[in-house]
Image (cartoon, rainbow, N blue to C red):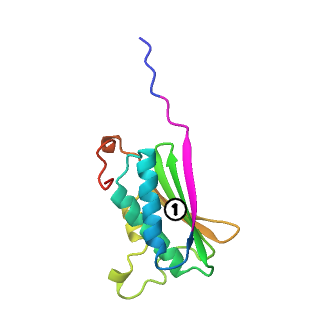
Amino acid sequence: MNTMAPPRPTELHECRVRLTAAATAAGEARRWVRAAIRARHAPVDADIAVLLTSDLVTNAIRHEAGDTVVLAVRCGHGRLRVEVHGTSRFRPGQADVPADVETWPGLVLVALLSDEWGFYRTPAGKAVYFALAYQPDLAGGRPGAG
């Protein structure tokens, strides 16, 4: 008996959005991520995805020297990946965490709730990202998809 595994999806869908570095950017980014999850039927927890997106965008804006940040959302190859590109060249970390950590969870949530996260340098500054692996058991009735 010849058994073949289903082919791994090779299609990668990406959207990139330029966001004004303002207080409204995190909300706009959350809407874009939720829309991408719906459009691609990505089996991830949308509530976690938008929470982590909000963290990345808020941190980018807090340290942004320019007027905009760029949100990149990729669905495919078994995962959702969200990147936030900005002009800051500082390594993401917790060196500048205020004493009242409750007001700034920073990348702690990203590290705890994502399957992967990190950053890389770009010609303009850096990009910080997280990825959530697809969870086939969430297909159809994904939490937070409504």
Query: In the image, what residue occupies the spot 37% across and 63% down?
Result: 112
Horizontal side of 61 relative to 144 (left or right) equals: right
Task: Give percent across and percent down for residue 74.
Answer: 52, 52
Q: Which residue is mark 1?
A: 129
Q: Amino acid at mark 1?
A: Tyr
Report whether residue 93 is seen: no
Q: Residue furthest right?
A: 123
Query: In the image, what residue occupies the spot 33% across and 53% down?
Result: 145
Query: In the image, what residue occupies the spot 42% across and 51% down?
Result: 37
Label total for image: 1
Report whether residue 62 is seen: yes
Quadrant of the snapshot with the N terminus:
top left
Q: Residue furthest top?
A: 1
Along the viewing direction, whichever of 69 and 111 lies nearer the viewer: 69
Along the viewing direction, whichever of 114 and 35 lies nearer the viewer: 35
Residue 94's place in the image compared with 134, above or below, is: below
Q: Residue furthest bottom?
A: 99
Task: Give percent across and percent down for residue 146.
Answer: 31, 54
Secondary element under disc 1, as helix, strand or loop, is strand
* Segment colored magenta: 7-18
Horizontal side of 3 relative to 127 (left or right) equals: left
Residue 134 sits inside the magenta stretch: no
Residue 15 sits inside the magenta stretch: yes
Q: Please tell me how crowded label 1 is: few (under 14), some (14-19), or many (20+) other residues with Cα within 10 Å.
A: many
Along the viewing direction, whichever of 27 and 121 lies nearer the viewer: 27
Task: Give percent across and percent down for residue 136.
Answer: 35, 40
Horizontal side of 123 relative to 6 (left or right) equals: right
Residue 66's place in the image compared with 83, above or below, is: below
Task: Give percent across and percent down for residue 129.
Answer: 51, 62
